[in-house]
Amino acid sequence: MFTKRLLDTILQGPPRSTAPLEHDDWPSTMLEGPHGPYRVHVRQHDPSAPLLLAVHGWTSGTAHARNRTEHLFHEGFNVVLLEMLSHGTSSYAGHFTAQCVVDCLDHLIDHLDSGHLGFASNEQLILHGHSLGAYVVIRSASGRHRDRIRALLLESPMTCYSPLLLERLRLPSFLRKYVVRKLMTRWNAMHPGLVITSLADVDVPRWGCPHVPTFVMQADPDARLGTVHLDTLIDAVPESLLSVWRSSTLRHSGTSRHEERDLAQVAWLREMEFIPRC
């Protein structure tokens, strides 16, 4: 009984999330995804403009994702914001895993070609993720849509689940190993297409690894995640693909609006020739 309660606690959704985004410039629609309905917000110039998909972090929401990407709309991108399950208005009562959100993002990318969201092309995409959202986009960009991803924009990224899990499992070693085995069994029952046999399977690089140009905007220091997540990314990604911008005024959360970050991001996109040509 204790183990079941502990697993249910680990796999529950967030205790809270930020208020949903409600703005006329960012109309939304609900999509029926693989784990139930989830909301997406769209702001677009025209169907042919290049597309950026953004995923917010744990207990955050699309209002904060809007703050982190609105300047990119003004640079000429169409922007789509995915609201995670169990956040905002994307109600979800089941067990929550990052893979559930990956499944939604993959479903959203599938949906882009349906015409339902008003996009006409199947051009390559740029994915943006903050914290847990970065963990999600890293996995999705390494999966079946790998060839559609042009670049990744990651803010204070989470790259490993195991340190966070072990942080929550302050138990004797033998009991922790037992609970981890039970947790992997539960995960594999939920996601039979992604079998986990070791905690290393939910960490970069096994979880996924960027294979396209990647720009990291890193809170320095990162009071929530510390250094292990960025260090893991640096070790796993070729130096030629990874650019890291650090800021002492950027916090892991609480600074969704940050002018210096926006300027650094646009400068990198321009250097990489990803800014749309008018």
Image (cartoon, rainbow, N blue to C red):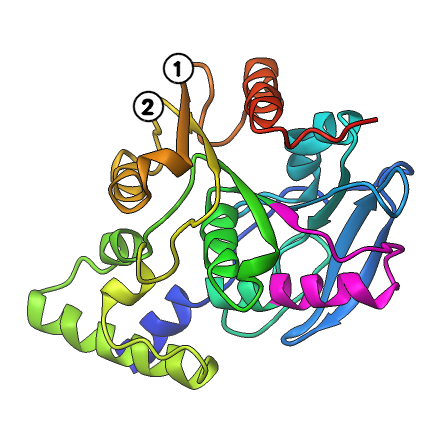
| Residue 94 figure quarter | bottom right
Task: Say which of 162 and 273 sits in front.
Answer: 273
Task: List x then y, in percent, for residue 174.
Answer: 8, 72
Q: Tag 2's secondary structure?
A: loop
Task: Say which of 168 and 70 sits in front.
Answer: 70
Task: Say which of 113 and 11 sits in front.
Answer: 113
Image quarter where the C terminus lies is: top right
Reply above or below: 248 against 17. Answer: above
Q: Residues within 10 Å of mark 2 (few under 14, many from 20)?
A: some
Q: What segment carries the magenta color?
A: 104-126
Q: Residues within 10 Å of mark 1 (few under 14, many from 20)?
A: few
Q: Tag 1's secondary structure?
A: loop
Residue indicated by mark 2 = 221
Task: List x then y, in percent, for residue 203.
Answer: 30, 57
Q: Residue at x 31, y 77 (%)?
A: 184
Image quarter where the N terminus lies is: bottom left
Task: List x then y, in percent, for residue 201.
Answer: 29, 66
Q: What's under tag 2, amino acid-wise?
A: Pro
Residue indicated by mark 1 = 248
Q: Is residue 169 left or right of residue 255?
A: left
Q: What's under tag 1, amino acid-wise?
A: Ser
Q: Residue at x 26, y 34 (%)?
A: 227
